[in-house]
Amino acid sequence: MATKDRVARCGFALAPAISLSAQVGCVFIYLTMWQDQLVPDPKTFPSGIKALADYVHANGLKLGIYSDAGAFTCQVRPGSLFHEKDDAQLFSSWGVDYLKYDNCYDLGIPPKKRYPPMRDALNATACPIFYSLCEWGVDDPATWAGEVGNSWRTTDDINDSWAREGKYIYQELMVVSRCSSATMITVEWNVLGLQSSISVSVRDLWQHKEVAKAAVALFSTQVEAHDCAVYIFTPTRGGQSVM
């Protein structure tokens, strides 16, 4: 809920179609199976998903959830394959607005056969749920996913890689504090895949301003308790951004 509060404080609730995609703390909701029925992890969500959805909706945001078009999720939690109708109805009863549907443990069944059943199940519920396909681009979703979901991923997982020198390059970084008090967090260039000698300009997206013009080797910032900050790091040359 702290993440939801931060999103609301930053004014995102005023923008249309903003969803807190139940990546609370940047981690999707994980579910466990009990008597062939998905249930929230009681340690992570002791009040249940419906209470969380009501809390998020009361603050003008939307709530998303994660499942998988396979026997298990990528974290080996129960998937929704062959349980699409039951799971879709459950998500609807909780007040979920968005479903990210992953692609692990597919039992050898092609994506074109595994993803439409959840579309049909979601469409049969009482509430509209945004359907986001995450099949990693393995079966060219651009040619068919438009008739199945509201959005679809076209690539595998991305990583913090950089383009070659002289190209348009920058990197976004979210700094998150899980401490109970304000703390200083340092990011070293090797974490970003950069040589320590490279000069980098740093722009704070919350403050809408450049906070460092030519940082070298590392960047430090103070982050309040259970808060986050987002920065854009751009390598510079001679004090000028390499853009």
Image (cartoon, rainbow, N blue to C red):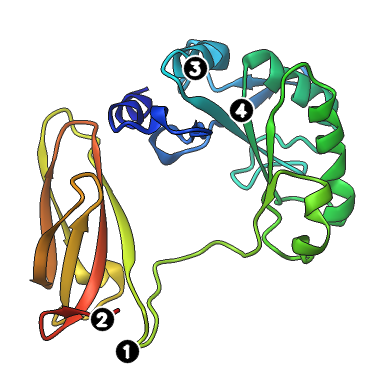
Classify the position of the C terminus by image quarter.
Answer: bottom left
Numbered mark located on residue 31 in the image: 4
Res. 192 image quadrant: bottom left
Q: Is mark 2 on a helix, strand or loop?
A: loop
**Residue carrying label 3:** 57
Q: Which residue is drawn at 11% across and 40% down?
A: 183
The image shows residue 59 at horizontal and vertical percentages of 41, 17
The image shows residue 80 at horizontal and vertical percentages of 76, 35
Q: In this view, does 116 lie to the left or right of 149?
A: right
Which residue type does callout 4 highlight? Leu
Looking at the picture, tell me which residue is in the foreground, 115 or 17.
Answer: 17
Looking at the picture, tell me which residue is in the foreground, 37 or 93.
Answer: 93
Q: Which residue is drawn at 61% across and 64% down?
A: 156
Of pointers 1 and 2, the one earlier in the residue sequence:
1
**Residue carrying label 2:** 242
Of pointers 4 and 2, the one earlier in the residue sequence:
4
Q: Is residue 50 left or right of residue 81?
A: left
Res. 143 image quadrant: bottom right
Crowd band around label 3 with a 10 angstrom C-alpha radius: few (<14), some (14–19), many (20+):
some
Q: Distance between the residues labelled 4 and 3?
A: 21 Å
Which residue type does callout 1 highlight? Gly
Q: How far apart are marks 3 and 2 (CA)?
A: 42 Å
Crowd band around label 4 with a 10 angstrom C-alpha radius: few (<14), some (14–19), many (20+):
many
Q: Which residue is drawn at 11% across and 50% down?
A: 221
Q: What element carries label 1?
A: loop
Q: Distance between the residues labelled 4 and 2?
A: 44 Å
**Residue carrying label 1:** 166
